[in-house]
Image (tube, rainbow, N blue to C red):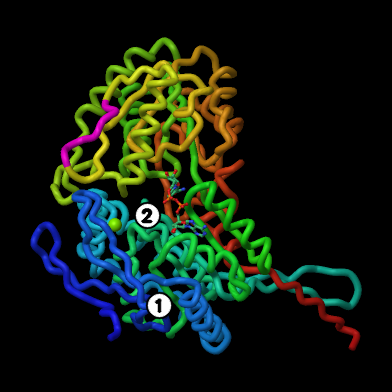
Amino acid sequence: MASKCEETITLPDGRKVKIYTGLFINNEFVDSVDRKRFETINPATGQAITSVIEANEKDVDIAVEAATKAFNEKWINVDGQERGRLINKLADLIERDLDELAALEALDNGKAYTIAKSDDLPFTVAVFRYFAGWCDKIHGKVIETQGDKFCYTRHEPIGVCGAIIPWNYPLLMLAWKLAPALACGNTIVLKTSELTPLSALKVAALFKEAGFPKGVVNILSGFGPTAGAAIASHMKIDKVAFTGSTATGRSIMKAAADSNLKKVSLELGGKSPNIILADSDLEEAVKWSYQGIYQNHGQCCCAGSRVYVEEPIYDNFIEKFKTYAQNIKVGDPFHKDTFQGPQISQRQFDRIMKYIECGKKEGATLLLGGKRHGDQGYYVSPTIFTDVNENMTIMQEEIFGPVVAIAKFKTIDEVIEKAHLTKYGLAAAVFTKDISRAIKISNTLRAGTVWVNCYNVVNANTPFGGFKESGFGRELGKYALELYSQVKTVQINLEC
Ligand code: NAI
Ligand code: MG
């Protein structure tokens, strides 16, 4: 008997929501070849929400076949204006279903429902709308050459793109990859994280409703070592875009090199330094720094996990920051006042607790938190370490939880040197009222994004990506189009 591919679930607040559990291939929700399913967990309770159909290598093959056929026979002939219309239509439908989609994010991921509604979903819509606008503005140039030749370039789609996304921002990560890929005229096979498959499947149904031709967007639920690895090494996938851990990013790049040398873009982790100078507006610096680390429960690639505070204001900063952290509302994602819900999984909870133990063992001072919050689900209380140095594990490795390390510094040269003592280079921030110093320090910091007097400010039209081992390629903004198109040079001899 075929597995069921849709059902109705009841949300914690009593609402009933229709969800899809099948693999989305060729605009249909289908069973997998091996008819396997896996459970997705509500991290607030540790209980299964439901089970979804699991893709493996064979299902990836089927999805790639669908995407290849759609690219060659249909999508390649759909002009930019029509692609833009379809993407805008999709954005309208996401907006129509915003409440339900935000609720699915909260249920499957554990993030606060009110924040999913006010931040994640509107940003998702904005990303689709932004790239919808690019569709009919993607074009090459005429290049002057010598003699009787005529040369121009075309910006063509790459073909079938693979996307492998994480669980921390399920719909945003989907949008960051699908929107520019579709705008440039590619077709896609996207694998969601095994921890958060539900919201993307709901959006899959909206792609169909919006009128996208079958096979243009294919969305699979499945695990990394099977479905994910099959995408990375597939001979008929022309490009793979990945967001997640540096270790997995490395294996994806290897798989691409060992298969068909598909193009790769990687958005990996970070250990971002946040530098607070003595002349900054202290209230503002505290407010942004607390958002910088605790937003999304610390499960953010650009989290400001290393805060460096100039000596004269250090004590004052710590006192104010601690007050903010103590007052964070941790709890049920569906409670309207909640800021911090549970971590995504038991595994991530255990990892974070291990890092906290390691911090204590290596001599850092645990100023706040460091323990489980509540008696069910994967909650970690907001945690602060002080008396830290760059040799400590908690100053080097990405913890991906609500854990911040705060250090003191005396000179700019010293803090820049310390800021750079990490393999990562995703983001950094500096707080000061002195604009010249802000610019000089921003220029020096080796990071893909530098925030001045703010944190975590990312827009649909502003590029985002890493230096060093935080990856390469820029998502969002016009730069993202380069990841999903290739330049063809046409040389014409006018003499014949
Ligand atoms: P991960 O990098 O293993 O998982 C991210 C995605 O990659 C998921 O869809 C997963 O199924 C897939 N994947 C895993 N192994 C794969 C493989 N061999 N081939 C292809 N795809 C594969 O990250 P995980 O285990 O969920 O989290 C571990 C750590 O990674 C976190 O503690 C955090 O430090 C970091 N991370 C960073 C993220 C970011 O936004 N930069 C997002 C998620 C995790
Ligand atoms: Mg889940």
In the image: residue 216, left or right of residue 328 = right
In this view of the protein, which residue sits in the foreground, 218 or 155? Answer: 218
Closer-to-camera residue (125/357): 357
Mark on residue 115? none
The residue sitting at 21% across, 65% down in the picture is 100
Q: Where's ligand 2: which quadrant?
A: bottom left
Say which amino acid is labelled 1.
Asp
Residue 77 on image: x %, y %: 55, 86
Of the 4 image quadrants, the one containing the N terminus is bottom left
Crowd around label 2: few <14 · some 14–19 · many ≥20 (10 Å):
many
Q: Which residues are magenta?
A: 369-375
Answer with the quarter of the image where residue 331 lies.
top left
User: Any atom of ligand 1 within 8 Å of the CB at mark 2?
Assistant: yes
**Residue 148, percent across and down?**
89, 78
Q: Is residue 231 above or below residue 85?
A: above
Q: CA distance from mark 1 to mark 2?
A: 24 Å
Q: Which residue is mark 1?
A: 34
Give the class, few, some or many, for how many residues have Cα within 10 Å of label 1's Cα (few <14, many ≥20): few
Residue 308 location (% of width, % of height): 45, 22
Instruction: Find out if the beta carbon at label 1 lies less than 8 Å from the nearest ligand 1 atom.
Output: no
Q: Image check: 480 left or right of 455? A: right
Secondary element at tag 1: loop
Q: Are marks 1 and 2 in contact (CB under 8 Å)?
A: no
Which residue is the site of mark 2? 167
| Label located before the other in sequence (1 or 2) | 1
- In the rendered image, the vertical position of residue 357 relative to residue 220, given as above or below: above
How many labels, in total? 2
Helix, strand or loop for disc 2: loop
